[in-house]
Image (spheres, rainbow, N blue to C red):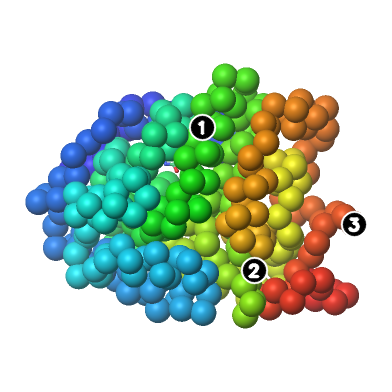
Amino acid sequence: MNQPRRVENLQTDKGRVPVYATGIVEQPWADYSAVDHDVWRQLYERQRQLLVGRASDEFLVAQDAMGMSPDRIPKFSELNRVLRDATGWELIGVEGLLPELDFFDHLANRRFPVTWWIRRPDQVDYIEEPDLFHDLFGHVPLLMNPLFADYMQAYGRGGVKAHGIGPEALVNLTRLYWYTVEFGLIRQQDGLRIYGSGIVSSKGESIHCLESTAPNRIGFDLERIMRTRYRIDSYQKTYFVIDSFEQLIDATEPDFTPIYARLATQESYPAGTVLESDRVYSRGTGEGWASDGDV
Ligand code: HBI
Ligand code: FE
């Protein structure tokens, strides 16, 4: 497997991240080795087993509708036929992380960038940057869900706008992506469930986010999220819980400009903060207000 081409590092609020060529690359499907396909199969089967009872109903329904197979790395061209019909989204192949504006512009045009290479066998439990498994298994299925598909396009449009406003607005908006698209939880009748891509593509965090007593689980609040910092190299200290995808869309309807202006005058919160005004859930059950200490 030929290695991805890194061209530079980008200073972001996540520190210096490797940034790749921003061009669209054809998925070199014929070049995937048996080891690559086996890494896909191993990760896919392990996560699918873990996620029943942990992932949101929408995620599991969407992933089944995608028709992905554990047997081999899916072909983007085959998935695009299904995805375009469902919500008008399409996958494009990329080298890896893109500069923010390139990424936002793709989302604003219903194109989701998927990294063409998959991690090595010795990286199955952790890889510091998004690879094909994180993108294809984690991000792509929910693009089959019309509400989430609309949210992702609206997010992209908001990102292009925030990029024009300035770096602070970008940091605020990136936090929204982080605490919803990457690490979001949703409340169902039968308890809290995962919809965030960073969680569903990680064995450890799929368990930790619902069952550990360590993290806070706080009801979704847009400005609270935009004020809250996050860590990229450990499990999250806080997960935000939406009641529905409709709530996500409604919250992101208004123009964010006045929110950015307000936030610019306020301190941001450390990742592990819990405020009096927070709606705190106990672990995993989603029964609303936590009893004392059962956070
Ligand atoms: N690039 N390919 C790719 N995939 C991402 O998920 C991604 C990105 N660039 C920037 C980015 N995500 C985050 O900073 C978002 O919050 C914008
Ligand atoms: Fe991601």
Q: Could you tell me if residue 149 is visible in this image? A: yes
Q: Residue at x 83, y 27 (%)?
A: 265
Please tell me which residue is depicted at 47% across the width and 40% down the height of the picture.
Answer: 153
Residue 284 is situated, as x and y percent measured from the top left of the image, at 66, 75
Q: Secondary structure at mark 2?
A: strand
Q: Is residue 283 visible?
A: no
Q: Which residue is mark 2?
A: 187
Q: Amino acid at mark 2?
A: Arg
* Residue mark closest to the camera, 3 vs 2: 2
Instruction: Measuring from the top left, give residue 221's x and y in whole percent.
Output: 74, 50
Residue 33 in picture, x, y percent from top left: 14, 57
Residue 162 locus on image (x, y percent): 59, 26
**Distance Cα–Cα, label 3 vs label 2:** 21 Å
**Relative side of 5 to 125, left or right:** left
Q: Nearer the viewer, residue 96 or 179?
A: 179
Label 3 neighbour load within 10 Å: few <14, some 14-19, many 20+: few
For label 1, the residue is: 157
Q: Earlier in the sequence, mark 1 or mark 3?
A: 1
State yes or no: discs 3 and 2 in contact (Cβ < 8 Å). Answer: no
Marks 1/3: CA–CA distance: 33 Å
Residue 46, image quadrant: bottom left
Q: Which residue is mark 3?
A: 276
Work out whether mark 1 precedes mark 2 in sequence or the reverse, and give the earlier one: 1
Label 3 lies in ligand 1 vicinity (Cβ under 8 Å):
no
Toward the left, the furthest residue is 30
- What type is the residue that disc 1 sits on? Arg
